Image (cartoon, rainbow, N blue to C red):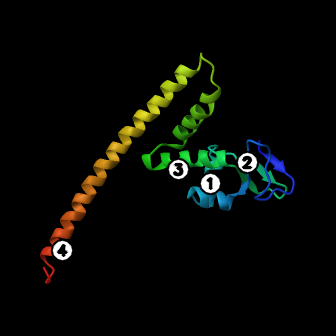
Amino acid sequence: MPETVRGAGPEHSCGPAAGRLMQIGEAADRVGLSIRTIRHYEDAGLIVPSARSEGGFRLYTEPDLDRLAVVKRMKPLGFTLDEMRDLLGVLDALPTAGDEHRPALLDRLGMFHTVATARVTALREQLATAEGFADTLRDRLDQHTPDH
């Protein structure tokens, strides 16, 4: 559960590891997501603000922004919210995983890498097809423009 910070504004922090706290608008600007999207990701359990001000405003830290950036990069690859939650769980667990859990986490991370790589390849192929189509239309336009 996020900590409530008395008088928390953009310059307050809630511990040495947390760093500077920022409200949702600044977080949205920094990550390139809308406030509405960040709230949606919070409702879906993908992100939890590190703290809340006395007035109830969400307050985010750099690690929170890093987490949002992971979600943002997964979205265009078609990962579902459940898959995003799963990957975030793996990433959260890896730094402190004991020897008995590390291999399974690394296998899971490897599977996400394989899926992401395949989806990137598919997107590149779609982009090449789309660029070819746009080039064809440009050629047709040039053929029928009086100046050419």
Mark 1–mark 4 distance (CA, rounded to whole Å) = 42 Å
Mark 3–mark 4 distance (CA, rounded to whole Å) = 37 Å
**Label at residue 122:** none
Question: Badge 4 local density, few (<14 within 10 Å), some, or many (20+)?
Answer: few
Up-down: is 48 above or below 11? above
What kind of residue is marked 1? Ile
Do the residues under discs 3 and 1 have CB atoms within 8 angstroms?
no
What kind of residue is marked 2? Gly
Residue bearing the label numbered 3: 72
Up-down: is 69 above or below 138? above
96 lies left or right of 58: left
Observer-side mark, 3 or 2, equals 2
Question: Badge 1 local density, few (<14 within 10 Å), some, or many (20+)?
Answer: many
Pick whichever of labels 3 and 1 is earlier in the sequence.
1
What residue appears at the point 63 percent right and 19 percent down from the top-left corner? 98
Pick whichever of labels 3 and 4 is earlier in the sequence.
3
Pick whichever of labels 2 and 1 is earlier in the sequence.
2
Q: Position of residue 54 (x, y in %)?
A: 85, 55
Residue bearing the label numbered 2: 19
Question: Badge 2 local density, few (<14 within 10 Å), some, or many (20+)?
Answer: some
**Label at residue 38:** 1
What kind of residue is marked 3? Lys
Disc 1 element: helix
What residue appears at the point 44 percent right and 50 percent down from the top-left corner? 76
Disc 3 element: helix
Do the residues under discs 2 and 4 have CB atoms within 8 angstroms?
no
Pick whichever of labels 1 and 4 is earlier in the sequence.
1
Mark 2–mark 4 distance (CA, rounded to whole Å) = 55 Å
Observer-side mark, 3 or 1, equals 3
**Label at residue 141:** 4
